[in-house]
Image (cartoon, rainbow, N blue to C red):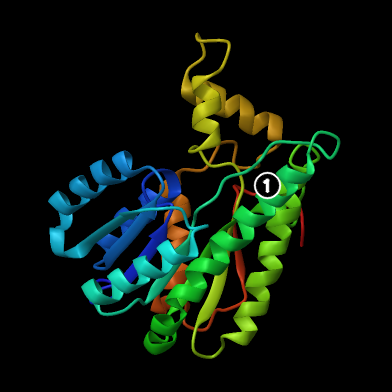
Amino acid sequence: MKPYEGMSAVVTGGSSGIGLATVRLLLEQGARVALCARNEGRLNDVAQLLARDHGDDRVLARAFSVLDPEAVQGFAQDVESRFGGCDLLVNNAGQGRQSTFADTSDDDWRAEYDLKLFSQIHPIRAFLPMLRSAKGAIVAVNSLLAYQPEKHMVCTSSARAGVQNLLKSLSIELAPDVRVNSVLLGLVGSGQWTRRFAERADQSVSRSEWYGALARDKGIPLGRLGEPEEAAAAIAFLGSKAASYITGAQLDVSGGLSRHI
């Protein structure tokens, strides 16, 4: 029997990168999956491919911002109507902001905290009744920056730390009904790094060479960037019955970049 056979999962930010890799893995492992993202065109294209490969009855896609509480509540209602409930919520929406303290404005601080915290709060609030009923799990995609801040990402590092504290608090408050865990990502070859590679000045350097040089510069012990599928595997594990006695935990997916104990 597949690990997620007969179960339903929700993935925010599910149309690309780690979110999409997670959606694909959960489908392969037997789940019905609802995904959301802001870009409607891309989301619809992805949903069509997923439905073709796994069946239209196992895929639900909606385009909206997780910062819109009414839209998130509507999504939860659609999931309950279509799948009958939710066993796993994967909060993946949101990306990092590069800035130092000197060049981060008040509006930037507010926007970053709003995004990082409410991309967790709104989906958890909306899906919590279903998760309680299912004795389900929440897995948040967070960053190593929560424990290991970088001066050029001071704003997002601070917000990530706040998210981690929130998740730890929820792991206590929601126990024993709902498990709450997170993955702490280092450098993964998707999102911002894909864009930076595309924007690089030296077009003669291959993707693998550029990523290898980046890994050496950052001091990653495994000598490379992670793959979205590797992050997805950690997420799927924490959300599964195999992790039934794990809550309030964080799993580093960083190639050994973590320096905290």
- The answer to whether 86 is drawn above or below residue 106 in the figure is below
Q: Quadrant of residue 200?
A: top right
Q: Viewed as shown, does residue 164 lie left or right of 202?
A: right
Q: What is the three-letter code of the residue carrying label 1? A: Leu
Q: Viewed as shown, does residue 156 lie left or right of 131?
A: right
**Viewer-proximal residue among 78 and 147:** 78
The residue singled out by tag 1 in the image is 257
Where is the C terminus found, in terms of image quarters? bottom right
- The answer to whether 9 is drawn above or below residue 51 in the figure is below
Answer few, some or many: residues within 10 Å of disc 1's Cα (few below 14, many 20 plus, some between 14 and 19). Answer: many
Q: Position of residue 221 (x, y in %)?
A: 65, 42
**Viewer-proximal residue among 38 and 68:** 68
Q: Secondary structure at mark 1?
A: loop
Number of numbered labels in the structure image: 1
- Residue drawn where x is 31% and y is 56% of the image: 62
Where is the N terminus found, in terms of image quarters? bottom left
Q: Position of residue 128 (x, y in %)?
A: 46, 80
Q: Viewed as shown, does residue 246 lie left or right of 62?
A: right
- Residue drawn where x is 52% and y is 84% of the image: 245
- Residue drawn where x is 37% and y is 55% of the image: 36
- Residue drawn where x is 28% and y is 69% of the image: 78
